[in-house]
Image (cartoon, helix red, strand yellow):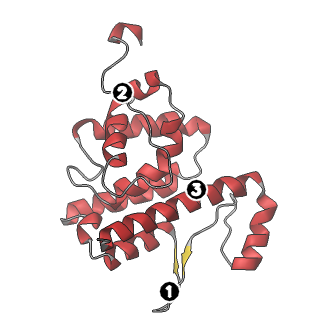
C-alpha cells in the first residue's frame, strides 16, 4: 500500500537529490545557469545555485527547498515532521535554516566546522529536534550525504555522534532513495591512543 508518508519521502528525496545534482552541475558550468534561467525561469543566485520551484494546479508556484518540503509534509498530513511542540518546531526551523545557510554550498574548509558543530550538538540527542524524527533530519541527511560518503573510518569515528545520527536517518523507513548507503562500523577500529 502506497501511503502519503511514503509519497512525501520519495518526493522529498528526489527533490533533494535533484537539487544537489543541479547545484554541482551548475558550479561546474556557470554559463548553463543562464540558459536554465531563460528556459525554466528559475532564479539563479550569484553562486550558480538553482532555487527549486514546485508548480501545481491548485495555486501559485512554491519557491525554495524549505517552502516546498514544508508544503509536502502538510499535503502528506504528517505535521509531526515539522515538530510537535513550539520548541520542537523552532528547532526544526533552526536546522532547516542551518542546512540552507551553512551546509548548502559550503567550501571544503567549512566541512570540519560543520561536522564539529553537528557532532557536539548531537552528543545527547537521537535526532536534530531531540528524540523525534523530523523534516530537519531528512533534509540535513541529504545536505551532508556527500560529506559523510567521503569520510574515512577514522573521521567517522572522530565524529561518532554525527555518524550515529546519520546511520539512524539513513535506515529510517523511506528516507534513503537514489543515494548509496554509507557504511558505518558498529565497533571502534582504533583505541583512543591511536587518534
Placement of the N terminus among the 4 image quadrants? bottom left
Q: Which tag, 1 or 2, sits closer to the chain's start?
A: 1
Q: Nearer the viewer, residue 110 or 145?
A: 145
Quarter of the view holding residue 161? top left
Question: As displayed, is residue 73 above or below residue 147?
Answer: below
Reading the image, the residue beneath label 3 is 20
Question: As displayed, is residue 49 above or below residue 43?
Answer: above
User: Could you say whether the residue bearing mark 1 is in a helix, strand or loop?
Assistant: loop
Q: CA distance from mark 3 to mark 1?
A: 22 Å
Residue 90 placement, left or right of 183: left
Reading the image, the residue beneath label 1 is 56
Which residue is depicted at the point 24% across and 64% down?
Answer: 83
Placement of the C terminus among the 4 image quadrants? top left
User: Could you say whether the residue bearing mark 3 is in a helix, strand or loop?
Assistant: helix
Q: Which tag, 3 or 1, sits closer to the chain's start?
A: 3
Q: Nearer the viewer, residue 172 or 90?
A: 172
Closer to viewer: mark 1 or mark 2:
2
Residue 86 placement, left or right of 121: left
Indicate which disc residue 185 carries: 2
Which residue is depicted at the point 32% across and 36% down?
Answer: 164
Amino acid at each position: 500500500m502506497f501511503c502519503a508518508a511514503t509519497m512525501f519521502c520519495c518526493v522529498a528525496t528526489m527533490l533533494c537529490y535533484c537539487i544537489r545534482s543541479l547545484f554541482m552541475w551548475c558550479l561546474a558550468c556557470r554559463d548553463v545557469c543562464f540558459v536554465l534561467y531563460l528556459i525554466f525561469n528559475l532564479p539563479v543566485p550569484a553562486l550558480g545555485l538553482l532555487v527549486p520551484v514546485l508548480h501545481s494546479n491548485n495555486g501559485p508556484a512554491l519557491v525554495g527547498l524549505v517552502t516546498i518540503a514544508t508544503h509536502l509534509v502538510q499535503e502528506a498530513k504528517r505535521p509531526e515532521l515539522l515538530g510537535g511542540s513550539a520548541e520542537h518546531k523552532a528547532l526544526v526551523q533552526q536546522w532547516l535554516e542551518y542546512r540552507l545557510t551553512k551546509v548548502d554550498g559550503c567550501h571544503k574548509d567549512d566541512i570540519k566546522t560543520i561536522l564539529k558543530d553537528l557532532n557536539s550538538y548531537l552528543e545527547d540527542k537521537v535526532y536534530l529536534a531531540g528524540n523525534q524524527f523530523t523534516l530537519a533530519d531528512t533534509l540535513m541527511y541529504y545536505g551532508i550525504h556527500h560529506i559523510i560518503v567521503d569520510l574515512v573510518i577514522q573521521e567517522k569515528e572522530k565524529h561518532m555522534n554525527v555518524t550515529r545520527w546519520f546511520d539512524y536517518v539513513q535506515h529510517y523507513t523511506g528516507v534513503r532513495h537514489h543515494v548509496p548507503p554509507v557504511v558505518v562500523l558498529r565497533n571502534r577500529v582504533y583505541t583512543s591512543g591511536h587518534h
